[in-house]
Amino acid sequence: MTTSAPVNPNQALWEKGDFTRIAATMRESGEALVQRIGVSPGLKVLDLGGGDGTTALPAAKLGADVLVVDIARNLVEAGNTRAAEQGLTNLRFEHGDATDLKQLADQSFDLVVSVFGAMFAPKPFDVAREMVRVTRPGGRIVMGNWIPGDPTLVAQILKISSNYTPPPPEGFISPMTWGVESHVLERFGAAGIPPEKISFARDTFVFDYPATPAGFVDEFRRYYGPTMNAFDAAEKNGKAGDLQRELEDLFAAQNRGGATTSIPATFLRVTVAR
Ligand SMILES: C[S@@+](CC[C@H](N)C(=O)[O-])C[C@H]1O[C@@H](n2cnc3c(N)ncnc32)[C@H](O)[C@@H]1O
């Protein structure tokens, strides 16, 4: 008889499909964000939920010593392949969970970055505590979090998708709550960070896809775990066509590109001074 480890739904969601297909459309903004937040040679950086390296790779190219911890094993592998292809010996990807970074020592990083990463982990108070614990005094934490109810792309994809999926289990805390300042203050406050050390800014990520908006919807349908789950649920109710149409309308309305797709999306940038 074989026994298998219990499935972690958080991990299963992000190992589903292939997030690298979506990340490929986010590279320019990832690089620009890293330039904006100030990364210098030798800086010790942890990129939490860093996927295949949209922010980690440019940080390493600037000379930082970067570790990515991500829960999706396929993305860890994809990231290590990208690092090797680029000859970056100062960039490593490891499997791990933002809610419990027991493999990492206290105060071991100058900068902890998490761009649309740790927000997707369950137990947000544990995540805040772990991010604070591994950051050295005088260091920084920078998070990028999608904003609930925001009219731009990602918040709207998640909102539309939620209308087609069964309600989440009791006690589930929406990742989008990380885009609400009061929740962020409360979570870092519980980890010992006073409000005056936390600042907020609205920032923008642009998704660049080299074909039509409808083609980009297909990428989400085929490769983005949350959208794949929404289509699985919609198909059971005979509503997949409705979901497809709603997403195609959304992507077309948000597109600022011409023949190809370029869609800006607003997020909350959180900076914590440790
Ligand atoms: C939307 S993707 C963003 C990836 C990357 N930061 C980027 O901008 O391309 C969310 C990432 O968070 C990771 N993630 C989700 N829950 C996590 C957890 N509990 N611990 C570590 N990583 C997690 C996923 O595996 C995925 O790589």
Image: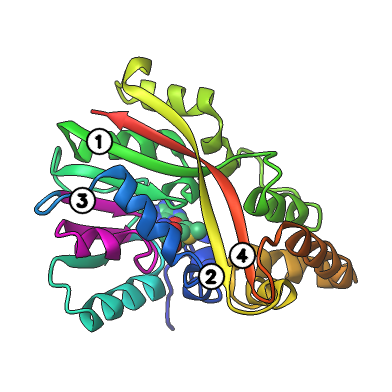
Q: Secondary structure at mark 3?
A: strand
Q: Mark yes or no: residue 95 visible.
A: no
Residue segment shown in magenta: 44-69
Three-letter code for the amino acid on which mark 2 is drawn: Ile
Please give left or right for residue 263 compared with residue 98 in the image: right
Q: Quickly name the residue at label 4.
A: 262
Give the answer, above or below, for where 177 lies relative to 187. Answer: below
Figure quadrant of residue 66: bottom left
Which residue matches tag 1? 140
Residue hosting label 3: 45
Label 2's element? helix
Please tell me whether mark 1 sits on a helix, a strand or a loop.
Answer: strand
Image quarter in which the C terminus is found: top left
- Indicate yes or no: mark 2 CB to ligand 1 under 8 Å: yes
243 within the magenta span: no
Q: Image point 20% across, 40% down: which residue? A: 134
Q: Residue at x 43, y 74 (%)?
A: 4
